[in-house]
Image: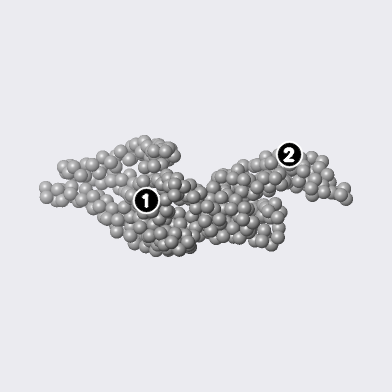
Amino acid sequence: MIFKYIAYDKLGEIKKGIIDATDEKSAAVILKEKKLVVADITEKKETKNGLNLPFFNKVSMRDKIIFTKELAIMIKSGLSVVDALSSIADEFEKPKFKKIIGEIANDIKGGQSFSKSLAKHPDVFPPLYTSIIKSGEESGKLDIVLLNLSEQLDKNYKLTAKVKSAMTYPALIFVTLLVVATLIMIFVMPQLEKVFNDTGVKLPMITRILLGTSRFLVKYWYILLVAVIALSIGFMKFIKTNSGRHYFDLFKIKAPILGGIFQKIYAARFARSAYTLISSGVPINQIFTTVGQVIDNSIYATKLDKTCEEIKAGRPLSAIFEENKLFPHLVPSLLKVGEKSGKTDYVLETLSDYYESEVDIVTSNLSSIIEPVIMIVLGIGVGFVIISVLMPIYGLVGAM
């Protein structure tokens, strides 16, 4: 919570400002530690201006990367975790993140561990993050672990950004085609219909279908708009259910063209996350449930949950992944090498680098892969309209 305060310093001068604290009592304690005599403390109500809207106030991946890297540098320089957090909180402008960092600092002051205080904010700091921080606390190498974590977060962020960037072009082309087709149906086809009616020519079935669709769009566009919105909302709610999420995740890995890309993305996320956890000292039989949540696919998460159980039963990791058909054959093959050499962490890092480069290559060429599909769809659409328009004209010429 954010509080406004009025206080006096040791010289009797009035000090005004704001402070982050879990409650009013905690705020008073913090001010007392700063050698201030409190006169008044009131909770500051957040205004609803543009910067405080949820969209602008959301803690982004870049925010977390900067936070993690700066924290690592400050701790390495000799600052305590609490002092480092307080210093970092002053740098961030987003009220939500400032508040969270302040709450974490107060929890640590109250005797709670850093990892447990982070775990109170799972929407900002996921299980992977808190697991790695916990391993850093237990090993006494928090600064090194934080620096490694910031590097891994940065690599994941760049991977996701590349995929989003590659998908932007096909999405833009599709939306443009949809808008152009709608404009033709609403403004061009009604004019052609008037010409056909004036000539009295008998229209073929394909032309009547096109003109009927045009009339529907002109008269009942609002019904179509409501239907699209309703279907969109229904789809979003459906994929939030267990069965809906399952089918949507299955579609992502089975879809033509995109399925192969998603499988490479998931392999890269798996290897990078598993490497980060293992290199941070987390036991191998505890990492896969956390990794499953990072991959963000329910089918992979279920498989990796079972992997934890099989490892506890004594099965080799390579044998488990040999049976797991979700990952490419290269994964179990290299894991077997890693188990024999005792360098599973190195193998996982190699796999993550390999699949990240594969995703980079595929996403770079995505537009050239999808372009033929777009051209075929565009050709079919244009051909349908041209034939629908030309057939009555040829019929008219033949009748003259």
The answer to the question of whether label 1 and label 2 lie on touching residues, with beta carbons closer than 8 A, is no
Residue at disc 1, secondary structure: loop
Q: Is residue 89 left or right of residue 234?
A: right
- 117 relative position to 12: left or right: left
User: Residue at the location (62% across, 42% down)?
Assistant: 48
With 84 as the anchor, is 361 left or right in this view?
A: left
Q: CA distance from mark 1 to mark 2?
A: 53 Å
Identify which residue is drawn at 36% across, 38% down.
224
Measured as percent of width and height from the top left, residue 366 is found at 37, 59
Q: Give above or below for 52 relative to 70.
A: above
User: Which corner quadrant holds the N terminus?
Assistant: top right
> Which of the two residues, 151 or 180, is positioned nearer the viewer here?
151
Q: Residue furthest front?
A: 314
Q: Secondary structure at mark 2?
A: helix
> Observer-nearest residue: 48 or 291?
291
Which of the pair 78/332 is nearer the observer?
332
Q: Nearer the viewer, mark 1 or mark 2?
A: 1
The residue at which mark 2 appears reads as: 24
Count the labels in the image: 2
Image position, residue 81 (x, y; %): 68, 53
- Along the line of sight, the residue nearer the viewer: 96 or 288: 288
Q: Residues within 10 Å of mark 2 (few under 14, many from 20)?
A: some
The three-letter amino acid code for the residue at tag 1 is: Asn
Above/below status of 371 relative to 217: below
Task: Identify the amino acid type marked 2.
Answer: Glu
Residue at 21% x, 48% y is 388
Image point 14% across, 48% down: which residue? 395
- The residue where tag 1 is placed is 324
